[in-house]
Each structure stands twice: as structure tokens, then as C-alpha cells.
Amino acid sequence: MGGRIRRVVVHRRDVVRDRSNRREGRLFTGHLGRSHVVDSVDRRGKQLVVEFSNGGGMVVRLGMSGRITLGDGSKRNPATAHQHLAWMIEPSRPSQSPIRMSFIDPRRFGGVYLFSSIEDCRERLLAGLGPEATSIQGIHLGERLGRTRRAVKAALLDQSVLAGVGNIYADEALHRAGVHPERSGRSISLVEAKRLAAAIRLTLKRAIQVGGSTLRDHVLPDGSPGGFVGEHEVYGRGGEPCLSCGRQLEVIQIASRSSTFCPTCQG
Ligand SMILES: [Zn+2]
């Protein structure tokens, strides 16, 4: 970090919510960081919190299909579909090339939310976010699941229940823990919640290690989805045999998302 943002290119105004939470009207590129240094970038669940040296900053919500890519800013901008915003960042060391950071989101469920201070960010943009999935403990997961009758899979995807689990990782963790995705949250015992929490932590940890995780797969310079793709045990393998028991994996819809599971291992 520490690079200064020289230029901000806005291709689509309506993916940005200004400091008054408006999607229309005049946008100050200074609020998007122009002329300011990037002080820090943190991940909270499926969003990035970027702070600028002027005290303001932005929350980038990745939604279902959004990602941030980093590219070589000295080369021509490759014509990327659905690139809504781009930041040209001058590196802190002159020997490095400038960086082009792009926000790409084909389905536009994500967006960029500007804040005036970190307090404003916490109160307005991060309130209601559940605990971090990467460090969730079984007892806390059990408490949160115990408050809902919804399917456990739907609850895991709800960022106010748990921050940072997407569709792929939810399927993988449920399979690893041997929990059927349609079970009601309230029906999950403490023992199961502990197993599920351990499976979530392990799944996310392994994903981060191979470079295909919540944060890192969104910043691979070539925009590729990262190395986790080849490691899925259930996700994307509907109709194929379960790697543990050989039974055919089934696919159902839960909360409008596909869920792949093994009827035997997760019975
Ligand atoms: Zn199985």
C-alpha cells in the first residue's frame, strides 16, 4: 500500500453510492480517492474496506459476481466487459510500475460505497455484519443458527449471520461437516455447529492458501478465479460421484442459489 491515486475513471456512475448514499447526482472523484494515498485495505466478510489519507474511503461490496483486479497501469487498459470503475495508482517506490485497480461486476449486485470517516463507515456500512467466518467458533455459530428456521445453507450465505462465506465455500463446508443444506438452522446441534465451524475455517484457510479465496481470487492480476477451482469436492460436481462414498451428488435450489450435496454423507 501507500500508493497515490492519480486518476479515477468512472464508467458507470450508478455502481457508486456517494457519502449521502445516493446513486445519482454529481460524484466527486476526490471522494473516490483521487490525489490521495491508499492508507489501508482490509477485508470484512465479502467486502473490502479501503481507507484514504484524507480520512475518507470506500467499501467495495463484491456481491455475487463482483471482483477487484490489479493490472499493470503502464499498459493499455484491456477492454474488459463490465469494468465500472478504474483507479490509476502511482506506486510508493518509483521503480515499480503504476497499478490499475478495476472494479468489475457483471451482475451489479455489488457496488462501491463511499464514507467520510472510519466511524461513518462502521456505523453506516459495516453495521449488522456477522462475525468473520475465517475465525468463527462452533458455539457462536450454533447460537446464530439457533435463531433461524431457515435452511442452514441460506443462513450461512446471509452476511449478517456470518461474514465471508460464499456459495462455493458453503457447499464445501456443509459437505465436509456432513450437514444437509436444507436442515433448519434451529435443528443444528452444538456438536454439529462445532463440526461445521471447523469445516468453514478449514475450507476458507485452504482456499486462501491456494490463492482462490474471498480476497485473493478477486485480486489475481489476470482476473482468473484462483487455484481453488480444481479442489472442489461438491461444488460444480452435481451428478458426479461423491468423493467420499461414491453416491451421485444432487443439486437443489436454496435461497435462489444452487446447492450441491451428497444425500448419504449429508443425510
Ligand atoms: Zn457421500
Image: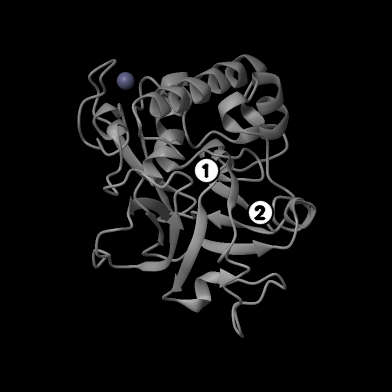
Which residue has dot 2 on it?
53
Query: Which of the image's four quarters has the C terminus?
Result: top left
Q: Earlier in the sequence, mark 2 or mark 1?
A: 1
Q: Quadrant of ligand 1?
A: top left
The residue positioned 52% from the left and 23% from the top of the image is 201
Residue 33 lies left or right of residue 68; in this view the side is right
Q: Please name whichever residue, 171 or 13, is drawn nearer the observer in this view of the structure.
A: 13
Tell me if I can see residue 61 in this picture: yes
The residue positioned 54% from the left and 33% from the top of the image is 183
* Picture coordinates of residue 140, whole percent (x, y): 71, 25
Q: Please name whichever residue, 87 or 186, is drawn nearer the observer in this view of the structure.
A: 87
* Picture coordinates of residue 263, whole percent (x, y): 36, 27
Q: Please tell me whether mark 2 sits on a helix, a strand or a loop.
A: loop
Q: Residues within 10 Å of mark 1 (few under 14, many from 20)?
A: few
The answer to whether residue 132 is above or below residue 113 is above
Q: Is mark 1 within 8 Å of ligand 1?
A: no
Q: Residues within 10 Å of mark 2 (few under 14, many from 20)?
A: some
The residue positioned 73% from the left and 28% from the top of the image is 143
What colouring style does the render use? one colour
* Picture coordinates of residue 234, whole percent (x, y): 31, 31
Q: Residue furthest front?
A: 94
